[in-house]
Amino acid sequence: MLVRPLTATWTRCDSLSRCIGLSKSITPMHLLFIFVAMTQQPNNPLHGKTLEMILNALVAHYGWPELGNRIRINCFISDPSVKSSLKFLRKTEWARKKVEELYLGTPSLYFDI
């Protein structure tokens, strides 16, 4: 398999997950999902992901206390719930952007591995 790294040259790699530095292997289903997502909306990495899906994945990965430490939002710190957080995030663009950036900055969540 040929993989294009961040540099301008191509390198040969037998495992895509090893080439991009992931600890778990990427299945053909992951590759299909990535291909479909990139061909439908190549400039939108969150295409097909709802805010609720993103928030649930972050809570499952980090937990409410750590999520509140990483993103200082009151709805994550004081009596957190998915319902109240979604209500706040849908009304507040700057907070939603921070949640989306944290989601995209966590490769194990973004690639759904």
Image (cartoon, rainbow, N blue to C red):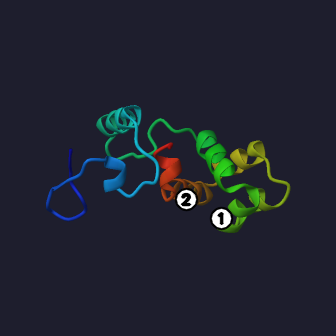
Q: In the current view of this chain or complex, which residue is farthest to the front?
A: 14
> Which label was assigned to residue 102?
2
* Image spot of residue 108 (x, y percent): 51, 51
Nearer to us in this view, 30 or 23: 23
Q: Nearer the viewer, residue 21 or 84?
A: 21
| Inter-mark Cα distance, 1 to 2 | 9 Å
Q: Which residue is mark 1?
A: 71
Does residue 98 appear left or right of residue 68 in this picture?
Answer: left
Compare marks 1 and 2 and give the one earlier in the sequence.
1
Q: Is residue 76 left or right of residue 101?
A: right
| Residue 73 x %, y % | 71, 63
Dot 2: element: helix
Name the residue: 75% across, 56% down. 64
Mark yes or no: residue 80 visible: yes
Which residue ends up furthest to the right in the rendered image? 79
Q: Identify the amino acid type marked 1.
A: Ile
Label 2: how many Cα within 10 Å (few below 14, some 14–19, many 20+): some
Given contact means CB atoms under 8 Å apart, are the residues at marks 1 and 2 in contact?
Answer: yes
Q: Residue at x 57, y 60 (%)?
A: 98
Image quarter of residue 82: top right
Badge 1 local density, few (<14 within 10 Å), some, or many (20+)?
some
